[in-house]
Amino acid sequence: MDTNTLGGALEREHRQIDGGIEAYLADLAGPADPSPLLSALSGLRRHIYLEEEFLFPPLKAAGLMGPIFVMLREHGQLWNSMDAVEELLAAGADADARRDACTALLALLDAHNSKEEPIIYTQADAILSAEAGSELADFLAQGTTPDGWVCDAASR
C-alpha cells in the first residue's frame, strides 16, 4: 500500500502495534520489560477509537455496512483480549500465561488485519471526503483516546 495514503498510515500503525507485542514476547525469557507491550496496547486502543469514530462511519454510510460490522465485532474481541493481557500483567502472572495471552492477541490481530487492510483501508482514500480524511489524518498525527472510552462491542 502507498505509504502516503490514509490506508498506508493505518497499516503502519498495525505494524507498530504488532512490533511492540512481539518485542515483549521476545524478551519474556528474561525479566521482560512490559513497556513495549503497554505501549502497543495503548496504541491499539487508540487505533480502534480512531477507526470507530473517524473511519468507519463514512465507510458504513457509503455502503460497506457488512464489512464494518465484522470489524466492530472483532474490535470487541481485541479489546477483551487486551483487558485479559493487562489483568495478567497486573496480577504478576507467570511468563507462560503472559506469553499465551499475547500470542492469542497477535493471532486475533493477524486475522483482523488480514481482512481490514485489503477491504477497509483500500477504500479509505477513495470514499472519505476531504474533510473526513483531514480529520482522520489530524487524529493520526496527534489524537488521543478519550479517558474511559471503550469500544461498543467489548464486554463490560
Image (cartoon, rainbow, N blue to C red):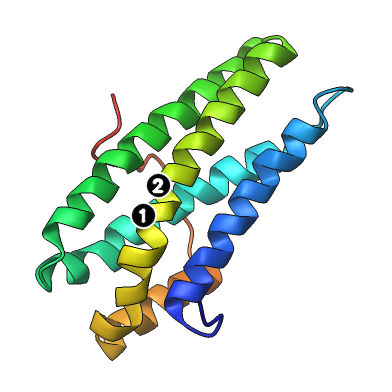
- Element type at mark 2: helix
- Residue at position x 50%, y 48% from top? 44
Above or below for 79 versus 97: below
Quadrant location of residue 78?
Answer: top left
Above or below for 143 versus 152: below
Question: Is 95 on the left or on the right of 72, as rendered?
Answer: right
Above or below for 60 versus 110: below
Residue 79's disc is: none
- Element type at mark 1: helix
Quadrant location of residue 29?
Answer: top right
The image position of residue 7, as x and y in percent, is 43, 73
Q: Quadrant of the C terminus?
A: top left
Question: Is 143 on the left or on the right of 69, as rendered?
Answer: right
Residue 115's disc is: 1
**Residue furthest bottom in the image:** 130
Task: Give neighbour class at mark 1: few <14, some 14-19, many 20+ (Cα, 10 Å).
Answer: some
Spatial separation of the CA atoms under disc 1 and disc 2? 6 Å
Task: Give neighbour class at mark 2: few <14, some 14-19, many 20+ (Cα, 10 Å).
Answer: some
Q: Which residue is mark 2?
A: 112
The image position of residue 96, as x and y in percent, is 69, 13
- Residue at position x 83%, y 32% from top? 27
Question: Is 47 on the left or on the right of 151, as rendered?
Answer: right
- Residue at position x 60%, y 50% from top? 17
User: Label 2 is placed on what type of residue?
Assistant: His
Q: Residue 10: in sight, yes or no? A: yes
Quadrant location of residue 67?
Answer: bottom left
- Residue at position x 80%, y 34% from top? 26
Q: Is label 1 in contact with label 2 (beta carbons under 8 Å)?
A: yes
Q: Residue 146: in sight, yes or no? A: no
